[in-house]
């Protein structure tokens, strides 16, 4: 890093602060403006924000580790979630928008009976908005600390000071500008991050050691380029179950969390659908390829390095010219800050709207906004403290994956089956926490066998919520009628509709769109990969129907 690199980084900091200051007045007009931007944003802006916030400092490092250890097929660890993402796009995004809520936790008070819904709201606001959110923020901080410490050659104390500065800066523009500032900075951060990762991929692939795409194809073992892994219990778990059965941040079955939060900022259910569709395509299909190319190239340049994640940072140090290093560091800062700002705003929305306002109903909107701003800073500082206790990001990820197993079924069915109630959802959250906690405490050796823990948790949780559903009273008819009148859901709701149902026709239409979307997205994924592998004719043959399918979906009215 030289003075040009640092100038680029400083320039980036100035831009994000100016954006926060620019939207400050608009964001603080009301709670609706602060948390949903008045539902006035365009679908493409909301979609870009979803993409930006799912790229943290650890993401390209994790992809590099997957590719170096398991080849291209290692990415099915998260490529499987595209199926669930498309399910959310066509069957849930329009319903989320119709709900007209400020947070996905507020949805519970629309869907369920008053007292159980309040209990569930308070619990979820603490469990997801504070505890789980704090864990996610901490592991993002851990990854960023590792990166800047290596890239800038800092000691532990200086690294903590730099991290504190980054968190305060991010908290500042997040607290000032609310969700609208977060979304606009996300859009800027997406382009910086994607462009910079493309630059790194270009420089390392073009290096003499690699010899361009042709050298990449010739010097790397063919098994590395294989798209599909061997079929085993782990693959069956991910492709067959995980995408619909487990809660995971950013990939919740049926949507939720900060993905739903972006849906709320759009202007209509149709725009919410298109925003979510754009997110799925960019997140799963387009954006990973610069990371993958860089990861494959590191197999040539650093064949004997054992710490696979670090090879991405080593490539930054060894192959980027001066000036460009600052651009890529700014990209990592952008990725980090977009993720942090989203989780801070999301966590503060839960704390204020779904916890504080329920306990103190007389609290005025201006006071709620001030509380949200204060909680933003508190959550940021706590996340840095928690980060000092996280030794393994992989273990934190594993815990999140397993602790949400089985709850996905309820999250999907609550939109389609009237009999699901608040107690169903509570049991689906508590059961995996207790079961996985018991395994970790009494049989820690089982935690190494993820499929075993996953499937046992799924079975136990499913039995628990089904029994709970039929042993507890249903949601009162009047509450369900209010929900149906506002959301107009599809599925088993006939007793609560006062108008003729057209759900079957709509479901068939959306099922067709879902199938087209999944096939088109995977075809495009394979087309890009085959192009980089030198199989241009096959790449074109795959890309044409993919493009036709996606153009059809983006131009279609839903």
Image (cartoon, rainbow, N blue to C red):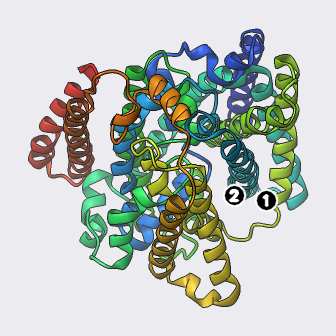
Name the disc covering residue 330, or none: none
Q: Position of residue 47 (x, y in %)?
A: 46, 29
| SS class, disc 1 | helix
Residue 36 pos. (x, y %): 62, 22
Left or right: 135 with respect to 101? right
For the point 77% across and 26% down, the residue is 173
Residue drawn at 86 percent across, 60 percent down = 156
Counting every numbered tag in the picture gives 2
Which quadrant of the figure contains the N terminus? top right
Quadrant containing the C terminus is top left
Q: Is residue 505 visible?
A: yes
- Disc 2 is placed on an element classified as helix
Q: Nearer the viewer, residue 235 or 321?
A: 235
Q: Residue at x 68, y 54 (%)?
A: 136
Q: Residues within 10 Å of mark 1 (few under 14, many from 20)?
A: many
Q: Residues within 10 Å of mark 2 (few under 14, many from 20)?
A: many
Residue underneath mark 1: 387
Nearer the observer, 55 or 467: 467
Query: Do labels 2 and 1 touch, CB within 8 Å?
Result: yes
Q: Nearer the viewer, residue 221 or 42?
A: 42
Residue 192 in sight in this render: no
In the picture shown, does residue 154 fall above or below 183?
A: below
Residue 232 image offset from top left, x and y in percent: 32, 79
Question: Can you give x and y, in whole percent of width and height, for residue 112 in the image?
Answer: 58, 41
Query: Badge 2 is on which residue?
Result: 139
Query: Is tag 2's residue or tag 1's residue first in the polypeptide sequence?
Result: 2
Q: Is residue 182 above or below residue 112?
A: above
Query: Taking 479 as reference, is 18 left or right?
Result: right
């Amino acid at each position: 890093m030289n003075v040009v690199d640092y100038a680029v980084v400083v320039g980036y900091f100035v831009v994000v602060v100016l954006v926060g200051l620019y939207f400050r007045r608009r964001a603080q007009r009301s709670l609706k403006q602060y948390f949903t931007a008045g539902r006035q944003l365009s679908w493409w802006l909301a979609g870009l924000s979803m993409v930006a916030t799912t790229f943290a400092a650890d993401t390209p490092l994790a992809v590099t580790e997957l590719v170096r250890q398991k080849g291209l097929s290692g990415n099915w660890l998260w490529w499987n979630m595209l199926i669930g993402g498309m399910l959310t796009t066509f069957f849930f995004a329009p319903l989320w928008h119709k709900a007209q809520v400020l947070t996905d936790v507020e949805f519970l008070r629309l869907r369920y009976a008053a007292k159980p819904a309040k209990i569930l709201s308070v619990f979820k606001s603490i469990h997801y908005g504070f505890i789980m959110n704090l864990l996610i923020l901490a592991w993002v901080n851990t990854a960023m600390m590792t990166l800047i410490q290596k890239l800038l050659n800092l000691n532990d104390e200086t690294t903590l000071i730099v991290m504190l500065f980054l968190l305060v800066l991010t908290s500042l523009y997040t607290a000032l500008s609310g969700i609208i500032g977060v979304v606009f900075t996300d859009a800027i951060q997406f382009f910086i991050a994607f462009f910079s990762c493309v630059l790194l991929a270009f420089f390392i692939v073009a290096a003499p050691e690699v010899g361009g795409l042709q050298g990449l194809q010739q010097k790397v073992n063919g098994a590395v380029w294989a798209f599909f892994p061997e079929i085993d219990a782990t693959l069956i778990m991910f492709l067959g179950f995980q995408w619909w059965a487990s809660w995971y941040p950013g990939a919740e079955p049926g949507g939720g969390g900060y993905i739903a939060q972006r849906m709320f900022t759009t202007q209509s259910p149709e725009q919410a659908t298109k925003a979510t569709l754009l997110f799925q395509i960019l997140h799963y299909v387009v954006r990973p390829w610069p990371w993958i190319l860089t990861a494959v190239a590191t197999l040539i340049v650093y064949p004997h390095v054992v710490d696979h994640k670090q090879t991405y940072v080593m490539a930054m140090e060894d192959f980027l010219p001066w000036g460009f290093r600052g651009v890529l560091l700014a990209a990592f800062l952008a990725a980090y800050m977009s993720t942090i700002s989203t989780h801070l705003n999301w966590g503060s929305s839960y704390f204020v709207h779904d916890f504080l306002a329920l306990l103190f109903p007389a609290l005025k909107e201006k006071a709620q906004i001030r509380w949200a701003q204060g909680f933003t800073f508190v959550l940021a500082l706590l996340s840095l403290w928690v980060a000092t206790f996280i030794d393994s990001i992989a273990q934190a990820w594993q815990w999140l994956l397993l602790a949400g197993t089985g709850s996905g079924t309820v999250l999907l069915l609550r939109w389609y089956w009237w009999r699901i109630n608040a107690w169903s959802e509570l049991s689906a959250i508590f059961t995996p926490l207790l079961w996985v906690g018991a395994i970790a405490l009494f049989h820690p050796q089982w935690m190494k066998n993820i499929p075993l823990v996953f499937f046992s948790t799924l079975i136990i949780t499913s039995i628990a919520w089904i029994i709970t559903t039929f042993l507890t009273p249903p949601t009162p008819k009047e509450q369900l009628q209010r929900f149906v009148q506002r959301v107009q859901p599809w599925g088993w709701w006939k007793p609560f509709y006062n108008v003729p149902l057209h759900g079957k026709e709509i479901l068939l239409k959306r099922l067709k769109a879902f199938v087209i979307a999944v096939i088109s997205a995977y075809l495009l994924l394979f087309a890009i990969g085959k192009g980089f592998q030198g199989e241009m004719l096959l790449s074109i043959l795959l890309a044409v129907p993919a493009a036709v399918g996606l153009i059809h979906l983006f131009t279609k009215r839903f």
